[in-house]
Amino acid sequence: MLANTIHTMSEQPKDEPKEIQIKAIKSPDFRTIIADRFFGGIDSMGLKAKIFSEQTDIENVINTEDIKKQQPILVRTIECELIIKPEQMKAFHLWLEGKIEEYETVYGKIPSPEEVSKRAEKYYLSKSEKNQDLR
């Protein structure tokens, strides 16, 4: 924590460590990425994780006369690659574990990807059965 007073070099007591002023700035390349998926693995440098986002491109569907026959295209955009050194992998793990616990305390248990898939499948099956009479 920075002290309220700043000492000049001649006023700085000899036995006290010098305080460092820190200024955080954003890179001109800074951007926010919604990390939909991760892909990667480990090597001698640590963890290499590519982060990509997904969106459904429906332009080809809505630009055709027979919409029912067209399939949307899933577009995956590789946003960036993180290279995380082994020591930072552990630090990140501890930090992330704490954030997961904090999130679940405030908002409730985070479902696993399998639980989300089962919920979606169940939802779309029931929706499909309800819409049978509309066909």
Image (spheres, grey):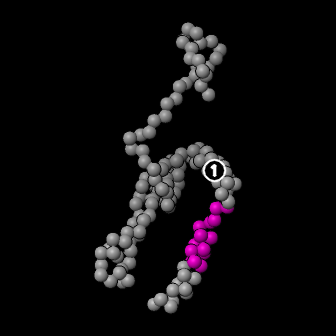
Residue 121 belongs to magenta span? yes
Would residue 22 be visible to someone looking at this image?
yes
As helix, strand or loop, the secondary structure at mark 1 comes to helix
Question: Would residue 106 appear left or right of 132 to someone viewing this image?
Answer: right
Nearer to the camera, 50 or 6: 6
What range is drawn magenta here? Answer: 109-123
Q: Residue at x 53, y 54 (%)?
A: 42
**Magenta highlight: main SS:** helix
Question: Would residue 75 appear left or right of 64 to someone viewing this image?
Answer: right
Residue at the spot of label 1: 99
Image position of 111 with respect to 28: above or below: below
* Coordinates of residue 84 in the picture (x, y in percent): 52, 47
Q: Residue at x 45, y 50 (%)?
A: 32
Residue 21 belongs to magenta span? no
Q: Residue at x 49, y 30 (%)?
A: 23
Question: Would residue 44 appear left or right of 13 to someone viewing this image?
Answer: left
Image position of 95 with respect to 8: above or below: below
Type of residue at label 1? Lys
The N terminus lies in quadrant: top right
Q: Residue at x 45, y 35 (%)?
A: 25
Tell me which corner region of the image, top left, top right, bottom left or bottom right, holds residue 67. Answer: bottom left
Nearer to the camera, 94 or 54: 54
